[in-house]
Amino acid sequence: MSDNIYVTELGTSRHVFQKYHFCRGNSNKRKSRIGLILNGEGTYIYLNQKLKVSKGDVVFIPENIY
């Protein structure tokens, strides 16, 4: 196993949420994602675990995770 990270595709998108957002991905390829919280705060929920985030936080979502 390598400790290197290789970028094969890079894209950006902007999401604005009022109360909540449910993301199931947009393809059969569940790619790793990195997010930057620009404003506000929220909670990521996965398998009944909660991660609170707020302005300035960076989140990493591994591939194959909804």
Image (cartoon, grey):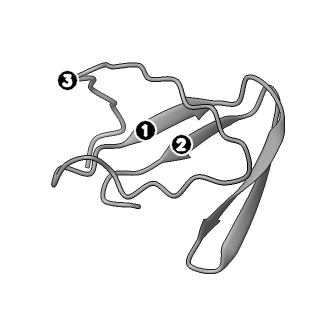
- Marks 3 and 1, how far apart at CA: 12 Å
Q: Regarding mark 2 in the picture, which secondary structure is present there?
A: strand
State which quadrant residue 4 falls in.
Answer: top left
Q: Residue 8 bears which disc, if any?
A: 3
Is residue 55 shown above or below 47?
A: above
Q: Looking at the image, which residue is at 53% across and 42% down?
A: 60
Q: Which residue is mark 2?
A: 60
Which mark's residue is nearer the viewer, 3 or 1?
A: 1
Q: Is residue 57 left or right of residue 20?
A: right
State which quadrant residue 58 falls in.
Answer: top right
Q: Are marks 1 and 2 in contact (CB under 8 Å)?
A: yes
Residue at x-position 30% and y-position 19%: 10
CA gap, disc 1 and disc 2: 6 Å
Task: Answer with mark 1 or mark 2, whichever residue precedes in sequence.
Answer: 1
Residue 61 percent location from the top left of the image: 48, 48
Task: Give left or right: position of 55 versus 50.
Answer: right
**Mark toward the start of the polypeptide (2 vs 3):** 3
Tag 1: residue type? Arg
Depth check, front residue: 47 or 23: 23
**Disc 1: which residue:** 33
